[in-house]
C-alpha cells in the first residue's frame, strides 16, 4: 500500500468512526509527521495576514497583538 | 493570557461556520481565524504535504504555536514531532513569561532551605504538557549542590511520581564551581536563590478526576564547615484532570 493510500484509508475510517488498528494508526501518525516543517525561525518576523474569526470580524496581526506579545496557534481542525 | 498582556489567536483551515460552532460549544471567546484554502498556512511554510491533495484533510498545517514579541518576531515556537501531545497555554506562559498558577503551588522546606513548587495550571488533561517552576531559597552561609557531583554528595532535584506522568524534566541553572580547600575538591553549588523550570507530560492513563500530584525534593545542605545529612522532602500539589473535549461534528 502506498503511503498516500494508507493516509487516505485511515482518514476515511476516522471520518466514519470505524475502528482503527493501533499499529496502523501509529504508522499513520509517523507518516503524517514526516518532514516536519515549523515555519519562521526564532528571531525572524512572521508574515502578516488578514483573516476572519468565528464572528466574521477581520483581524490582522497587529490587531491581535497584546502589549507583551501574543501566542499564535496553528491547529489542524476544530472539526475532528 | 489577556491578563498577562498577551494576545491569543488560533488559525485553522476550517470554515467560519465550523469555527463558530466550535467556539460556541467550547465557550471560546478569543479569535479562531478561518484560513479556508490554507493561504496563510502556506505563507508560514507549515502546510502538511503528507496529506494527499484531494483528500478532505488536505490543507492542514503541522500543528504548533508561535510565541511572538509585540513587533511580530518569533520569541519561541513549539512544534512537536508527535501531534498527539502538545504544550498547554499555561505551560507556555510559565516558560516564556514567568506567569504561574496561584492555585497549584506548594512551599516546602527542611533545614535552611525552602522551595516553592508551582504548576503552570491546576487543571490539565491527557497528553498535555504542564510547566512547573521550582524556586529555592537557601539561607546565608549555606549551599546546596548541582551536577555533576561525586556520589558521596546529593545533588538538588525535584521528581514527581505517579502512574499518569508519562515524562518529566527539570532544568536548573548551571551551578557555580566552589573550591573547598580543606577537602581538596571543587564542587558545583547553589547559594541564595535558584529558579528551575521543568515540564510534566500527562500520559494517556490519566483518568479525569481530582488528584494530589506527589513529588520529592532532594538536596543536601552544607556550609564551609559542616554537611547536614541529605534531605528528601515529599510534597503534594492538587491537580484536576479534565475529560478530553471532543471536536464538533459537522
Image: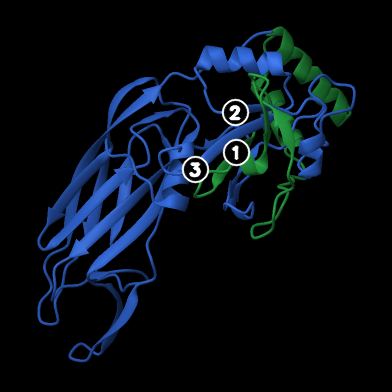
Chain colours: A green, B blue
Residues under numbered marks 1 and 2 in contact, where contact means CB atoms less than 8 Å apart: yes
The image position of residue B148, as x and y in percent, is 37, 71
Mark 1 — on which chain does it sit? A
Q: Are marks 1 and 2 on the same chain?
A: no
Quadrant in the picture for residue B248: top right
Question: Which of disc 2 and disc 3 is earlier in sequence?
Answer: 3
- Front residue of A39/B74: it is B74
Q: Position of residue B122 (x, y in %)?
A: 33, 32
Q: Tell me the distance, in whole angstroms, between the alpha carbons under discs 1 and 2.
A: 8 Å
- Identify the residue shown where x is 77% and y is 37%: B40
Q: Mark 1 points at which residue?
A: A64
Q: Residues within 10 Å of mark 3 (few under 14, many from 20)?
A: many
Tell me whether circle 1 and circle 3 mark residues in contact (CB < 8 Å).
Answer: no
Residue A55: percent from the left, percent from the top?
A: 63, 18
Percent coordinates x, y for residue B171 in the rendering? 41, 58
Residue pointed to by mark 3 = B6
In this rendering, would B5 be left or right of A57?
left
Amino acid at each position: 500500500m502506498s503511503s498516500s493510500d494508507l493516509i487516505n484509508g485511515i482518514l476515511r475510517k476516522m471520518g466514519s468512526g470505524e475502528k482503527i488498528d493501533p499499529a496502523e494508526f501509529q504508522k499513520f501518525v509517523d507518516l503524517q509527521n514526516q518532514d516536519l516543517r515549523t515555519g519562521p525561525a526564532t528571531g525572524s518576523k512572521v508574515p502578516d495576514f488578514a483573516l476572519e474569526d468565528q464572528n466574521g470580524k477581520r483581524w490582522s496581526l497587529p490587531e491581535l497583538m497584546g502589549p507583551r506579545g501574543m501566542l499564535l496557534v496553528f491547529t489542524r481542525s476544530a472539526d475532528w | 493570557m489577556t491578563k498577562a498582556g498577551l494576545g491569543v489567536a488560533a488559525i485553522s483551515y476550517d470554515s467560519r461556520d465550523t469555527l463558530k460552532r466550535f467556539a460556541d460549544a467550547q465557550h471560546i471567546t478569543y479569535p479562531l481565524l478561518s484560513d479556508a484554502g490554507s493561504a496563510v498556512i502556506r505563507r508560514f511554510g507549515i502546510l502538511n504535504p503528507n496529506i494527499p491533495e484531494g483528500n478532505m484533510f488536505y490543507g492542514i498545517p503541522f500543528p504548533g504555536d508561535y510565541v511572538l514579541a509585540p513587533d511580530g518576531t518569533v520569541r519561541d515556537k513549539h512544534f512537536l514531532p508527535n501531534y498527539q501531545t502538545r504544550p498547554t497555554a499555561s505551560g507556555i506562559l510559565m516558560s516564556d513569561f514567568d506567569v504561574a498558577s496561584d492555585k497549584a503551588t506548594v512551599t516546602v522546606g527542611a533545614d535552611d532551605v525552602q522551595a516553592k513548587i508551582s504548576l503552570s495550571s491546576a487543571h490539565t488533561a491527557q497528553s498535555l504538557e504542564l510547566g512547573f517552576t521550582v524556586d529555592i531559597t537557601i539561607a546565608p552561609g549555606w549551599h546546596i549542590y548541582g551536577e555533576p557531583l561525586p556520589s558521596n554528595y546529593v545533588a538538588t532535584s525535584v521528581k514527581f511520581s505517579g502512574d499518569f506522568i508519562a515524562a518529566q524534566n527539570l532544568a536548573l541553572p548551571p551551578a557555580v564551581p566552589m573550591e573547598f580547600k580543606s577537602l581538596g575538591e571543587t564542587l558545583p553549588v547553589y547559594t541564595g536563590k535558584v529558579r528551575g523550570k521543568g515540564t510534566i507530560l500527562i500520559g494517556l492513563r490519566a483518568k479525569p478526576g481530582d488528584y494530589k500530584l506527589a513529588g520529592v525534593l532532594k538536596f543536601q545542605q552544607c556550609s564551609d564547615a559542616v554537611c547536614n545529612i541529605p534531605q528528601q522532602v515529599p510534597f503534594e500539589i492538587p491537580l484536576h484532570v479534565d475529560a478530553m473535549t471532543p471536536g464538533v461534528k459537522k
